[in-house]
Image (cartoon, rainbow, N blue to C red):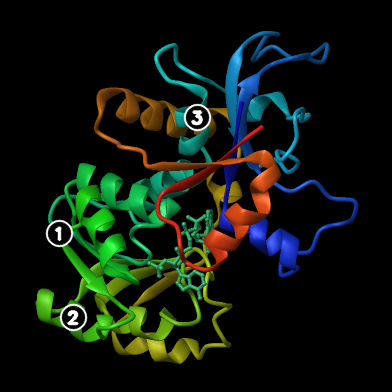
Amino acid sequence: EAIGVNFIDIYHRKGPYSQQLPFIPGMEASGMVEEVGKAVTEVRKGDRVAYAMQTGSYAEYTAVPSWKLASIPDNLDFRAACAAMLQGMTAHYLAVDTFPLKKGDTALVHAAAGGVGRLLVQIAKLRGAAVIGTVSNEDKATVAREAGADHVVIYTEQDFEKEVKKITNNGVDAVYDSVGKETFEKSLNCLKPRGCLALFGQSSGPVPLFDLGLLSKAGLFITRPSLSLYVTNRKELLQRTGDLFRWIESGALKLKTETFRLKDASKAHTALENRQTSGKLLLVP
Ligand code: NDP
């Protein structure tokens, strides 16, 4: 019914995360269960489900390990459920487990109008943190502010390190950095002593080799997390999707989606690659 487009689809297509050919892209979708294997107990034929972390979703049918399927609550539509899966679970694990934000913390979120970024801003606010978001233009600044960011820095025009230092006393507690190469060094400089940098993506390119000795000045922490390490079994999947679906149903988490026809998948990729999008991109077969 709906297919999620994620930045990783671009890495798969272009080669940084190479795949064996023939290859069907896509790591997220929602739809109906058409058929189940003999040992499957989690879902039944006809169930409305959504999944992430399984390649092959740019297609009408996909075989998915049953533990990865989340049942969609009755009052959530297929598109909303799909939009919550990969980027939603990522934002969830980052704010809840990688650096568990709490009231009084300040977080810096790069690409704050993006798919993960916009959800991460909202979840950070739900947990009581103050949020500084970075974006590349004024339209995206509006999106980030509407998501709840307390401060927004247009990092293509302003030096975000200087701006963060002006806004905070001695830096932020956590930086969630999905941009990588172009932001990494300044992201570290934005942290307060013993702060944590969660480098979870590389939209601008991979971070070059780094001298760990540089962390000793402020006792900083760096982690390079990935969704598959934070959703390793059905219990974790249901905990994260349970929170996300509940927040969406209650209006606490607001989605922003843009829809393309499946046959226009290349247009969705071009837009995402060229920083022309905000929120979630969906393909509809
Ligand atoms: P986004 O919607 O965030 O799109 C990428 C955004 O990155 C752009 O909109 C742009 O925002 C910003 N950006 C900055 N520099 C560049 C550049 N040179 N080229 C392209 N974009 C740039 O994508 P997703 O939400 O799908 O993914 C965000 C990142 O998180 C990706 O790197 C992805 O691989 C990673 N990720 C990691 C996961 C994990 O578990 N480790 C899971 C999910 C995603 P702006 O214009 O405001 O700068």
Q: Residue at x 30, y 36 (%)?
A: 253
- Figure quadrant of residue 33: top right
Q: Secondary structure at mark 1?
A: loop
State whether residue 148 appears in this view. no
Q: Residues within 10 Å of mark 1 (few under 14, many from 20)?
A: some
Type of amino acid at the residue the image marks with label 1: Asp
Comparing 154 with 209, the one in front is: 154
Comparing 215 with 154, the one in front is: 154
In the rendered view, does 59 fall on the left or right side of 264? right
Tell me where residue 125 appears, x and y as whole percent.
21, 48
Comparing 218 with 20, the one in front is: 20
Ligand 1 within 8 Å, label 2 CB: no
Q: Which disc number belongs to residue 107?
A: none
- Earlier in the chain: of badge 1 and badge 2, it is 1
Tell me where residue 205 appears, x and y as whole percent.
57, 77
Which residue is identified by label 1? 150
State whether residue 155 appears in this view. yes
Type of amino acid at the residue the image marks with label 2: Glu
Tell me where residue 145 appears, x and y as whole percent.
20, 56
Q: Residue at x 25, y 83 (%)?
A: 158
- Earlier in the chain: of badge 2 and badge 3, it is 3
